[in-house]
Image (cartoon, rainbow, N blue to C red):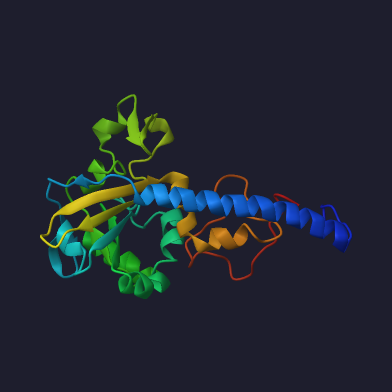
Amino acid sequence: MGPNHAVVSQEEWLQARRSLLALEKEHSRLRDKINTQRQALPWVRLEKSYTFDTPEGPRTLAELFDGRGQLLVYHFMFGESWDAGCPSCSFLVDHFDGALPHLNHHDVTLVAASTAPLEKIEAYRQRMGWDFPWVSASGDFNGDFHVSFTPSEMAKDKVVYNFTEIDPKDAFEELPGLSAFYKDEDGTVYHTYSTYARGLEEMAGTLMLLDRAPRGRNERTNMDFVRRHDEYEDTPKRHACCD
């Protein structure tokens, strides 16, 4: 069976590709503009103290910087009663370890934080073979950054996620996000940025590569193809949803 797609001459393909290139360049310029505005966002000084359980013992948010001036915290969906981390979060953080030396050399520390107890986090980390820092965010941290919700919050008409009110029926007790912080030389910590939902996609290089494959992400619903990396079948199967 031939491809269910238009097949044209090389000359026609070049014309279509050049048209797409113009749009891609527009997208690159828009991304640059967004990045500039992101860096120009005002900061919020953190007055509240947060403490985390780590393999090295209790650490404050300021101590998580590990001697650097910038901190990225990935809010990993792994609830207190869960036996394993979220498959989509697991897919995303599969991309972290290779980035660590580059981020660290550029004065950035990357840490994952979950509400699960440290012993569960460490067991799951060992299963997945990850090395990036991962802490247990006991207390209010994930709640204050609107990625963890208590039963009483889930019983309300609305919860706040991704800077808007949503129906709890469309949410989970844990949701993903990324928050950025800066620490002055005097130890003052500022919240500079947070992003949620599809704002996290660019952190997953696999998605960016799939977007350039012939069938793209080839999904029925957002990221429905994703599994934990030790749960895929040995032999990949042809996905027929878009054939």
Which of the two residues, 231 or 186, is positioned nearer the viewer here? 186
Rendered location of residue 125, percent (x, y): 33, 67
Please state the horizontal and vertical placement of residue 136, each as a whole percent of the image.
Answer: 22, 57
Q: Nearer the viewer, residue 214 or 43?
A: 43
Residue 176, can we see it? no
Residue under the image location 38 percent in, 39 percent down: 162
Res 239 seen here: yes
Q: Quadrant of residue 61?
A: bottom left
| Residue at figure coordinates x 34%, y 24% from the top left | 157
Residue at 80 percent of width and 60 percent of height: 14
Residue found farthest to the right: 9
Residue 70, by quadrant, is bottom left
Where in the figure is residue 27, as x and y percent of width and height?
58, 50
**Against 206, is 43 above or below?**
above
Placement of 191 over or under 65, stated as above or below = above
Instruction: Using residue 207 as the reference point, say whether residue 16 is left or right of it.
Output: right
